[in-house]
Image: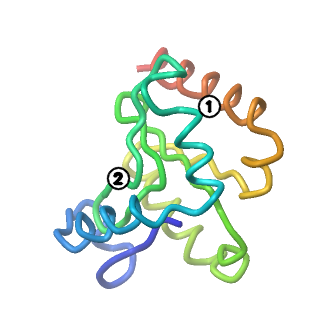
Amino acid sequence: MGTAFGQGVQDCAMRSRIGTVFARQLRRDMTLAEARLWSAIRNNSLGYRIRRHHPLGPFVADFYRHEARLVIEVDGPIHETQVVRDAQRDACMVEQGIEVLRFKNDQVIAEMPGVLDVLSEVIARRIGSQ
């Protein structure tokens, strides 16, 4: 449920105090899928430290692995109505060398082992390619 702040994506590199406050709120109000994924990856269980609801410029990423420059998004039904906005946000991230992985809520809930396998593989590839 990453959210943009300010006017469009032209402010990609700008860090927002509003984003930090909003990130704290999102941490308190996680969706069921976000909470289950966080439960599965917290405390370094994948072997990597992953941040939750992390501000990145004018956006808040659902999950972020800094060293891999990887954003992990868990998309609920709202994302079906904001395809263009998500594409702009993802393009902004890619411009900064950040890869974005998107999983649907039902994927995270029903296929957690597969989601964790993908995360481990992508993180290892991203860290190894630096």
Q: Earlier in the sequence, mark 1 or mark 2?
A: 2
Of 72 and 85, the residue lying toward us: 72
Look at mark 1 in the image and give the residue it sits on. 119
Residue 117 pos. (x, y %): 70, 25
Kind of residue at badge 1: Leu
The image shows residue 103 at horizontal and vertical percentages of 69, 51
* The quadrant where residue 37 appears: top right
The quadrant where residue 8 appears = bottom left
Instruction: Look at the picture and state if 103 lies above or below 67.
Output: below
Q: Mark 1, residues whose alpha carbon is within 10 Å: few (<14), some, or many (≥20)?
A: some
**What number is the disc on residue 98?**
none
Q: Residue 130, how many percent across, how many down?
A: 40, 20
Disc 1/disc 2 C-alpha distance (Å): 17 Å
Point out the residue furthest to the left here: 17
Q: Amino acid at mark 2?
A: His
Colour scheme shown: rainbow
**Front one among 1 and 129:** 1
Q: Left or right of 2: which side holds 109?
A: right
Residue carrying label 2: 54
As drawn, 29 above or below 6: above
Q: Vertically, is 54 above or below 17?
A: above
The residue drawn where x is 73% and y is 76% is 80
At a point 48% along the width and 55% down the height, the residue shown is 62
Residue name at image x 48 percent, y 66 percent: 89
Pointer 2: residues within 10 angstroms few (<14), some, or many (20+)? many
Where in the figure is residue 18, as x and y percent of width and height? Answer: 22, 74
